[in-house]
Image (spheres, grey):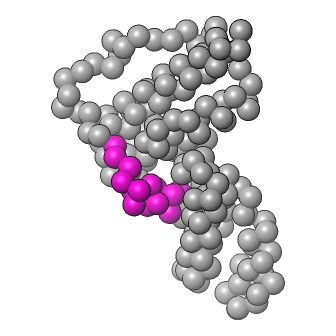
Amino acid sequence: MQQCIDGERAAYKALYDRYSKAMYNTAVRIVGKTADAEDVLQEAFTDAFMQIKSFEKKSTFGAWLKQIVVFKSISFLKKQRLVFSDLENTGKDFADEEELNEENIWFTVDIIKQKIQQLPDGYRTVLSLYLMEGYDHEEIAEILNVTHTTVRTQYIRAKQKLLQLIKNSIDYAE
């Protein structure tokens, strides 16, 4: 870190090499397309390197960088007009929706990854932030600037849609 602050180019490359793969994976889980994730990654590293002197060491560099990648990914999706509809006032109770039997669905990690990429952007974003990045519903609501109820509903719908996509691929394979 200090070498980067001192302007040593090799230190920037070392940090990039150390964190780029993990940060790319985070970006692609959120934005869904590899080319878009590459753009987000480059913007995130550029911002991080430009702001490296402001890094306060309250967390690890990796955690700080991941936060930048998540915010850049969300900003990218918002620019693409990703809409998180506010479901608080719809009057519909999503707990009453048909539940899928999760225990009867057998699948592989590859199928799950493939099906997550098929989810609509809003569903994929909330699901990725919650399940893969470890944010809770309140944090996601704050990041996306929507209500907690909207995040919860998007998560429930995303999970149901993902399970249905997986079930359909299994039924088709049989």
Whether 88 is among the magenta residues is: no
The residue lying toward the viewer, choosing from 169 and 31, is: 169
Residue at the image point whose x is 64% and y is 11% from the top? 171
Q: 43 left or right of 15?
A: left
Residue at the image point whose x is 74% and y is 80% from the top? 12
State the image coordinates of residue 82 (x, y, percent, origin top left): 38, 49
Whether 73 is among the magenta residues is: yes
Q: 93 left or right of 23?
A: left
Quarter of the picture containing the N terminus is bottom right
Residue at the image point whose x is 71% and y is 20% from the top? 107
Q: What stretch is highlighted in magenta?
A: 70-84
State the image coordinates of residue 10 (x, y, percent, origin top left): 81, 84
Q: In which quarter of the image is residue 150?
A: top left
The answer to whether residue 134 is above or below residue 64 is: above
Residue at the image point whose x is 39% and y is 43% from the top? 138
The answer to whether residue 90 is above or below residue 52 is: above
State the image coordinates of residue 28 (x, y, percent, origin top left): 62, 51
Total count of labels: 0
Quarter of the picture containing the C terminus is top right
The answer to whether residue 9 is above or below residue 22 is: below
State the image coordinates of residue 15 (x, y, percent, origin top left): 75, 72
